Image: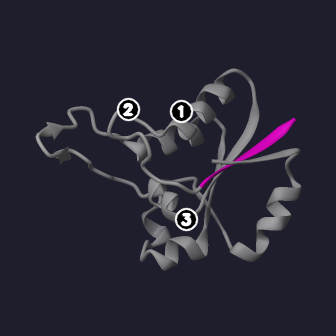
Amino acid sequence: MRALQIIRSAYRCTIEEQDDPALWIARAMKGAGASLAVLLRGNAVGYAVEGQDATGLSIGTRAQTRPPSLDQDINALIGGGTDVYVVAEDADERGIDVLGFAPGVKTIPRHELPRLFAEFDQVWHW
């Protein structure tokens, strides 16, 4: 079985945790032998931007001492053999230049999403 994980909501749980749970589970599943890919869309396209730095983040008096490094999580997924896609129009709408994406991130135009979905047995939307 091949699964495509679509991640649209960005930065959830990154105040309490050091990573996004959807990226974490994708990496854990791949490590256990699952066949899957990740599609970043909506605000989650920012995960693919190289060199993010969330140090100095605080909410009120609470400082995040272990900030997320989501670009490194993306690099680890790609390095482990997981295909990572980004919806090109979603990046463009947010002013993100695809040239700033981590090496190996694949952009896909929105109109080609049905073709991508058809390549998988299951599509999970986070």
**Camera-side mark, 2 or 1:** 2
Q: Secondary structure at mark 3?
A: helix
Which residues are the magenta region?
1-7
- Name the residue located 11 percent from the left edge and 40 percent from the top edge: 61
Which label sits on residue 42?
Answer: 3
Upstream in sequence: badge 2 or badge 3: 2
Q: Is residue 3 above or below residue 10?
A: above
The residue nearer to you, when weighing 56 against 83, is 56
**Hey, which residue is sitting farthest left in the picture?**
61
The residue at which mark 2 appears reads as 17
Upstream in sequence: badge 2 or badge 1: 2
Cα separation between marks 2 and 3? 21 Å
Badge 1 density bin: few <14, some 14–19, many ≥20, Cα 10 Å = some
Which label sits on residue 24?
Answer: 1
Whole-percent x, y for residue 8 in the image: 57, 57
Whole-percent x, y for residue 110 in the image: 70, 73
Whole-percent x, y for residue 21 in the image: 52, 36
Horizontal arrangement in the rendering, residue 82 relative to residue 21 (left or right) = right
Horizontal arrangement in the rendering, residue 74 relative to residue 119 (left or right) = left
Q: Secondary structure at mark 2?
A: loop
Inspect the image, locate mark 3, and give the three-letter code of the amino acid beneath it: Gly
